Image: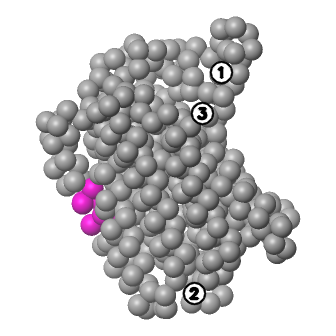
Amino acid sequence: MFILQGQGILILIAFAAALLIGCIILPYLRSWHLGQHERLEGPNSHLVKEGTPTFGGFIFLIPFVFISLLHWWHNNIAGGVTYEFAAALLCIVLTAILGFYDDYVKVRKDKEGLTPKRKSQYLLVIYLLYALYFVFVQQNPQSFFVLPFYGTVTFSAWPLKILFVLFVVFYLYCCSNAVNITDGVDGLCSSVTIVVLAALTYMLHLQIGKASNLRDFIQLDNFAFSAVTLIACLLAFLVFNFHPARVFMGDLGSLALGTVVSLYLLQFGWMLAFLFLGVIYWVEILSDLIQFIYFRKTGGKRIFKMAPIHHHFELSNWSEVKIVAVFSAVTAVGCFLGIWLFSL
């Protein structure tokens, strides 16, 4: 196993640190009145959540980033410097900062937050910079993706690499927004993402067994370890976020989680695996898109009682706990299919 004794201790420290951070910052978030404003057009059951503190993403992101960096630095000393993981972590932190800014605007200036156009512009710039690094700059430049039952498709010509950069930006943008929109029920985004990260960790573990050199082993270990660390931090966050939630992760957390899932899959050419591991994510965002288009085309008619689809089930008298359980189970099925198609 790639989780060695020392790594296991670090993961336990990350879990304990997340619990401690939650206990420390929650009273401050309340006293500073950093509560979320519920939309009037949302489910009536959500009105009681008015004022629930947001910015909860700090609870899991701080220990995740710190412990992951510590492990990456230790691996660099042991096996030579690699910057791919550090660049990925920087991208995650930048999207978290954007999410923090959006949350701050919501609680202090305008409850709608940043305009979709402005938020998208910032996000696209972050992802474009990372895509350029990923394709052209990093030590082993990457321009490929994996097709089930076929193998690896590689883009070596410059015009194709430019197209691949645009694809990477589009992929990261769509996937991160899909994860972001899933954060609408207590514990939903956290629980679904834990299942996805568990599957991703297993896929990375299988690749570690096939690593042909020390550098590849360390690269895989960096991402696998950080995925397990994030699982531990999210489990601690659920102590505060499970229904009835005492804190919300906010865009600070959900945008960062979207970047983690999509970017880690990208790193190893598993972009298409998002369709399986992230089945709930894209069902959520597609339900929102379908509802919007149908509403516009029919002059006000709706397919779902409310979108995204978790609100539809809420208005169908599903409890939030049931929604989380069912959506997590569906995610687990999608993860089994993704592992079978892309790893076995």
Residue 293: horizontal and vertical position, in percent?
Answer: 70, 22
**How far across and how far down the image is residue 12, in percent?**
30, 65
In the depicted structure, whether residue 124 falls above or below residue 6: above
Q: Alpha-carbon distance for marks 3 and 2?
A: 38 Å
Q: Position of residue 180 (x, y in %)?
A: 50, 41
- The secondary structure type at the circle numbered 2 is helix
**Position of residue 63 in the picture relative to residue 324 (left or right):** left
Find residue 17 and report its horizontal and vertical position in percent. 24, 60
Three-letter amino acid code of the residue under disc 1: Gln
Determine the secondary structure under disc 3.
helix
Task: Check disc 2 and give the amino acid type.
Answer: Arg
Which is the main secondary structure of the residues drawn in magenta? helix
For the C terminus, give its image quadrant.
bottom right
**Residue occupying image coordinates x 62% and y 59%:** 128
Task: Answer whether residue 336 is visible to the viewer in this image.
Answer: no
Q: What is the C-alpha distance between the residues marked 1 and 2?
A: 47 Å
Mark 3 or mark 2: name the one nearer the start of the chain.
Answer: 2
Q: From the viewer's side, name the closer residue of 126 and 225.
A: 126
- Looking at the rendering, which quadrant does residue 202 occupy? bottom right
For label 1, count other residues whose C-alpha is less than 10 Å away and answer few (under 14), some (14-19) or many (20+).
many
Mark 2 lies on residue: 215
Residue 205 relative to residue 228: left or right = right
Mark sitting on residue 194? none
Viewer-side label of 1, 2: 1
Pointers 1 and 2 in contact (CB under 8 A)?
no
The type of residue carrying mark 3 is: Glu
Who's the residue at 34% across and 54% down the image?
Answer: 60
Residue topped by disc 3: 284
**Lower sequence index among marks 1 and 2:** 2
Residue range corresponding to the magenta coloring? 11-18
- Comes first in the chain, label 3 or label 1: 3
In the rendered structure, find residue 291 and report the number of the disc placed on it: 1
